[in-house]
Image (spheres, helix red, strand yellow):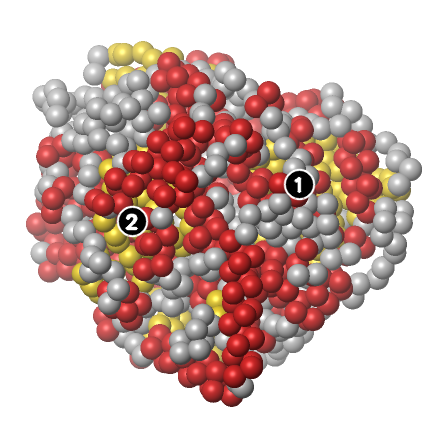
């Protein structure tokens, strides 16, 4: 499962948007990261990240050893240049025959990236670019199987394999650390986009886009299709609806005024001829931007690419994205969104601008990224604080700055607003901006925001995504619009200009606010009105429309629809020809690393404190995790734990209010956060551990350059021991935000809540996870909000008692990740932190009260009713019992189910956006899950059919090898140094040894055909005991209850 990656471009700090699907798409990446800020003097803050500059030198030196960009007979070498900030040696080429542009980047990075991007501006909301993005990966000229994309998922070492649809482009990126595998991925993707089966076979559009379905004359006519159901899910999410309404209102005269993803009511207007024409018009090499990144041979890239481009000639596709002229006067629009009885009075409102109508200068672009952080980057930032402190709503809505399209936008507002307060939100936003323009920002805030942004740029930490992918998407923010692809990646010069202007006292941010916001009439206020009948009305409208279509059809036409339905299902169920499968490029078992790589970990005990260190290259940054053992926390206190950990960084401390604390964190560190680690301990030897076992720690995490290590550890001590727990107003705000967050996330990611609920009945660790992050946590948050409003002294006292139990040196683990030199300098400060922390006065309990969690109290077989047009269907239970061995082969077979049987039955034939399964070796728990699923009982039946499928499967050596290769790829996912250190910490805490990992790898490699049948036998037994949890509409759950053998108890969730 993947999500859209962070974008380096335009100096924004980006976070993944977490779609959690095998085939992701997104209209925008996530907005500026919310966290951190600053220090007293500008000059001192500007120097905080100086230690990171060495990283550039190291990267550049590594890249220089990998070769150079030279001439090629099929390409003109336009220029060779470097992006010194990232040590990247870049060659910009143009293909002689077609005019295709190529950016070839030499980097000292084994995780190689390829991508091809087409400019694809749609003219309507049929979703044609989105449907085409799905469809081109369903077979091609050289690789005519039904779904080469899935075949690659099954048996590749890919580290990224996906596609994205933006409002004006479609991206096809892949990545792998294995050179042979990398070339395989490039071949399949290039043939897919240039020669797709989809433009010759209407069945692909029917499957991936939409079709009319009719199994029998007496049955109702229905719409089916993967994208159709995906977008019904999107349009069930109020904030997603608001985002689309906002974009279309801001850009009424351009391609951004329609939905490239597709509006469900409009998608059925897409014809096969229009679908084909769109590909023909935009998927020509002349309309592409091609990207390579990594340590692979530069010349070989061009040879491979030319083998596909050479058969095309020149073309001049009309794909330019028009500029939206700016209006002179603001306006207001109103739209409705689905709501429940409990949210019937909770409106949403946001104020939004298009910032410019001509290319923005690099300095202004950088300045806007920092301005966004000043306004909204943390809960203590100027505009964010004003909105949350206003009591006009429950939580922020709108993403702030969005700058990856041709014209950047800025928007912010509130959700949970009373109808009569909507105009007040607009006035407040404008008034705060007027105050900023007149008075400017506190110099400490400016310094903190600059330091925060600069740290992120220099660190170049892209999380779980390949660095080259972020580099590519960053380049596209300029390259797509026929500008220099490298300009948007360079920040040293505009950053220096900006700092110099600020040192001179120039009102940089004040002028930007005036010019692009206050004096800009192109401002729309979007008011979203809750409608408790909208969901039912939409379903009725679709039903009436389909009934009218059916009524208008002749018997011959109805028979044709039935035959088309049968033909599609037959093709979906039909196995690919062996000779077609053989055409796909593959790895062999001989291409695998049989040993795997261990993360260095040194363990040292000092009294009650354990120190873990991981010597890894971090360019002078120290990553610290200070973890407090939670064994002393009672079950009754468990619902308070998420609130307390949020208070650490959101309430201020005894000596600093939350604004000052936030700025100090931003000035002296690269960021701080908290996380709760919950896991079932390892029993060793691949055995399932007892269900009452639990490992539980609350961690305060942070990072800083080594020169700021002392301040980092002091800040960790301060927030853990001195955070204020007496600010009723702020706690009420935080709980309102939490409740609003759950209301948004449950209908949007119901599969995660269903999964957590099913597991909670079987193991203590899963129970605690559900109580702190699942459906129960939502109920706890509502209860705590009521208590905070009506009995604050009692809640404050309980929070203080909980902190006293939790924050103690007994049982504490301090985890440090850095290079050897940095570790040596940081360790004394970590030891000083340990010495300064209070003791608990008694040893850590040997057994946590959470071990006695009342698992039997967890509800089973539930239908969680939410306002949505799709379902999230979960089913599962204990596949292995405590004391039983979970062989490594089980993960191989489970992966086969996820990328094979479930992909086919739940997604391809069922029309859901995704279907998958999860096996947890330490707990022995197994769950099936679906995402944006039009079905319910049908999916349950398909889950229970998995056992028979495995037992009757003719498992060839090729199937085994393919599944093993994919499983090894999962084990060997690349990680950034901080992620490696944290992963090693978790391995240590649960008691997993290097020997356990070695044995698991050997068992994975030794998987055989009999292991498929063995897991099938276990799944057959599970199907008799499994329970079901569904998040979906009440109507869908009640309809399914008429057929389900075990009825679901329907519960409203609002």
Give the left or right position of residue 132, taking residue 833 as reference. Answer: right
Q: Quadrant of the C terminus?
A: bottom left
Residue 210 drawn at (x, y percent)? 54, 67
When the figure is inspected, residue 597 is found, relative to residue 249, above or below; the finding is above
Residue 474 drawn at (x, y percent)? 64, 46
When the figure is inspected, residue 519 is found, relative to residue 153, above or below; the finding is below
Give the left or right position of residue 923, taking residue 408 as reference. Answer: left
Q: Going 31% across and 63% down the picture, which residue do you hit?
A: 1032
Q: Count the marks.
A: 2
Q: Going 18% across and 21% down the picture, which residue do you hit?
A: 810
Q: What secondary structure is found at the residue carrying circle 2?
A: strand
Residue 119 drawn at (x, y percent)? 70, 58
Q: In which quarter of the image is residue 413?
A: bottom left
Q: Going 72% across and 35% down the picture, which residue do you hit?
A: 105
- Spatial CA distance of label 2 from label 1 is 36 Å
Q: What secondary structure is found at the residue carrying circle 1?
A: helix
Q: Going 23% across and 70% down the picture, which residue do you hit?
A: 342
Q: Which mark is residue 721?
A: none
Q: Residue 579 carries which label?
A: 1
Asked if labels 1 and 2 touch by Cβ distance under 8 angstroms, the answer is no
Is residue 475 visible in the rendered image? The answer is no
Give the left or right position of residue 100, taking residue 260 as reference. Answer: right
Mark 2, residue position: 875
When the figure is inspected, residue 750 is found, relative to residue 830, above or below; the finding is below
Is residue 141 visible in the rendered image? The answer is yes
Q: Which of marks 2 and 1 is nearer the N terminus?
A: 1
Closest to the observer: 301 or 196? 196
In the rendered image, the residue lying farthest to the right is: 73
Mark 2 neighbour class, 10 Å CA radius: few under 14, some 14 to 19, many 20 or more: many
Closest to the observer: 700 or 577? 577
Residue 471 drawn at (x, y percent)? 64, 41
């Amino acid at each position: 499962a993947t999500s859209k990656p962070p974008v380096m471009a335009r100096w924004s700090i980006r976070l993944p948007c977490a779609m959690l699907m095998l085939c992701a798409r997104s209209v925008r990446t996530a907005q500026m990261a919310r966290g951190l800020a600053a220090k007293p003097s500008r000059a001192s803050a500007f120097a905080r990240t100086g230690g990171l500059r060495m990283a550039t030198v190291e990267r550049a030196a590594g890249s220089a050893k990998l070769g150079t960009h030279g001439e090629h007979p099929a390409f003109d070498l336009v220029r060779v240049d470097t992006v010194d900030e990232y040590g990247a040696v870049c060659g910009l080429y143009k293909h002689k025959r077609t005019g295709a542009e190529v950016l070839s980047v030499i980097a000292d990075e084994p995780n190689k990236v390829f991508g091809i991007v087409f400019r694809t501006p749609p003219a309507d909301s049929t979703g044609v670019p989105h449907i085409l993005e799905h469809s081109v990966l369903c077979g091609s000229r050289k690789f005519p199987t039904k779904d080469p994309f899935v075949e690659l998922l099954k048996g590749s070492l890919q580290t990224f394999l996906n596609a994205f649809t933006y409002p004006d482009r479609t991206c096809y990126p892949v990545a792998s650390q294995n050179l042979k595998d990398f070339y395989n991925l490039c071949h399949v993707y290039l043939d897919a986009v240039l020669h797709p089966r989809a433009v010759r076979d209407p069945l692909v559009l029917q499957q991936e886009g939409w079709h009319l379905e009719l199994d029998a004359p007496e049955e109702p006519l229905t719409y089916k299709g993967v994208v159709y159901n995906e977008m019904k899910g999107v349009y069930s999410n109020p904030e997603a609806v608001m985002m689309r309404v906002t974009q279309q209102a801001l850009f009424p005269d351009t391609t951004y005024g329609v939905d490239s993803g597709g509006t469900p009511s409009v998608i059925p207007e897409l014809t096969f001829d229009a679908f084909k024409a769109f590909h023909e018009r935009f998927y020509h090499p002349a309309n592409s931007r091609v990207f390579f990144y990594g340590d692979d041979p530069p010349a070989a890239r061009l040879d491979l690419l030319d083998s596909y481009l050479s058969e095309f000639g020149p073309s001049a596709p009309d794909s330019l994205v028009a500029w939206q002229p700016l209006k002179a006067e603001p306006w207001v629009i109103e739209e409705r969104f689905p709501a429940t009885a409990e949210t019937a009075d909770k409106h949403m409102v946001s104020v939004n601008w298009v910032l410019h109508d001509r290319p923005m200068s690099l300095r202004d672009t950088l300045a806007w990224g920092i301005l966004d952080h000043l306004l909204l980057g943390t809960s203590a930032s100027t505009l964010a604080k004003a909105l949350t402190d206003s009591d006009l709503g429950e939580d922020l809505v709108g993403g702030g700055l969005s700058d990856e399209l041709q014209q950047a936008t800025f928007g912010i507002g509130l959700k949970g607003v009373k109808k009569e307060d909507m105009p007040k939100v607009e006035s407040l936003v404008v008034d705060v901006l007027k105050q900023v323009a007149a008075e400017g920002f506190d110099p400490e805030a400016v310094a903190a925001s600059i330091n925060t942004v600069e740290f992120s740029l220099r660190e170049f930490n892209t999380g779980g995504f390949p660095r080259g992918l972020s580099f590519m998407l960053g380049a596209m923010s300029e390259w797509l619009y026929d500008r220099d692809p490298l300009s948007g990646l360079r920040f040293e010069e505009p950053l220096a200009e900006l700092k110099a202007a600020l040192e001179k006292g120039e009102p940089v941010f004040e002028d930007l606010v005036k010019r692009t916001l206050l004096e800009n009439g192109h401002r729309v206020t979007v008011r979203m009105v809750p409608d408790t009948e909208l969901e039912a009305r939409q379903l009725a409208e679709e039903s009436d429309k389909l009934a009218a279509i059916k009524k208008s059809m002749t018997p011959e036409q109805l028979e044709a629809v039935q035959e088309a339905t049968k033909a599609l299902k037959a093709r979906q169920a039909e196995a690919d020809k062996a000779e077609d499968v053989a055409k796909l490029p593959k790895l062999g078992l001989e291409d695998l690393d049989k040993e795997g790589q261990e993360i260095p970990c040194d363990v040292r005990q000092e009294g009650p404190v354990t120190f873990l260190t991981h010597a890894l290259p971090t360019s002078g940054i120290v990553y610290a995790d200070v973890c407090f053992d939670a064994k002393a926390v009672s079950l009754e206190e468990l619902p308070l734990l998420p609130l307390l950990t949020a208070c650490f960084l959101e309430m201020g401390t005894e000596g600093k209010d939350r604004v000052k604390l936030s700025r100090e964190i931003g000035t002296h560190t690269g960021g701080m956060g908290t996380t709760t680690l919950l896991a079932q301990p390892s029993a060793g030897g691949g055995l399932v551990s007892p269900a009452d076992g639990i490992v539980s720690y609350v961690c305060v995490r942070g990072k800083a350059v080594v020169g700021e290590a002392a301040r980092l550890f002091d800040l960790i001590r301060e927030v853990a021991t001195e955070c204020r727990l007496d600010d009723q107003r702020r706690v009420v705000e935080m709980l309102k935000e939490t409740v609003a967050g759950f209301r948004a996330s449950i209908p949007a990611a119901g599969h995660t809540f269903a999964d957590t609920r099913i597991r909670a009945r079987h193991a203590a660790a899963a129970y605690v996870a559900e109580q702190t992050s699942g459906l129960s946590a939502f109920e706890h948050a509502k209860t705590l909000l009521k208590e905070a409003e009506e009995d604050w002294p009692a809640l404050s006292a309980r929070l203080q008692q909980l902190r006293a139990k939790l924050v103690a040196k007994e049982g504490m683990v301090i985890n440090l990740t850095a290079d050897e030199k940095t570790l040596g300098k940081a360790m004394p400060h970590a030891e000083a932190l340990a010495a300064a922390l209070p003791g608990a006065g008694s040893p850590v309990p040997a057994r946590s009260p959470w071990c006695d969690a009342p698992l039997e109290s967890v509800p089973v077989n539930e239908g969680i009713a939410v306002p949505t047009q799709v379902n999230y269907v979960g089913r599962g239970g204990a596949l292995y019992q405590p004391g039983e061995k979970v062989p490594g082969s089980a993960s191989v077979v489970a992966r086969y189910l996820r990328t094979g049987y479930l992909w086919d039955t739940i997604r391809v034939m069922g029309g859901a956006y995704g279907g998958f399964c999860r096996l947890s070796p330490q707990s022995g728990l197994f769950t099936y899950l679906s995402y944006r699923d039009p079905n319910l009982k049908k999916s349950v039946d398909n889950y229970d059919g998995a056992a028979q499928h495995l037992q009757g499967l003719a498992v060839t050596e090729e199937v085994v090898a393919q599944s093993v290769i994919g499983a090894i790829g999962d084990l060997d996912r690349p990680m950034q140094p901080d992620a490696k250190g944290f992963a090693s910490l978790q391995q240590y805490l649960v008691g997993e040894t290097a020997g356990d990992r070695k044995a698991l790898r050997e068992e994975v490699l030794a998987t055989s055909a009999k292991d498929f049948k063995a897991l099938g036998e276990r799944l057959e037994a599970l199907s008799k005991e499994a329970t079901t949890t569904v998040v979906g509409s009440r109507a869908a759950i009640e309809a399914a209850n008429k057929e389900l053998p075990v009825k679901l108890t329907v519960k409203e969730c609002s």
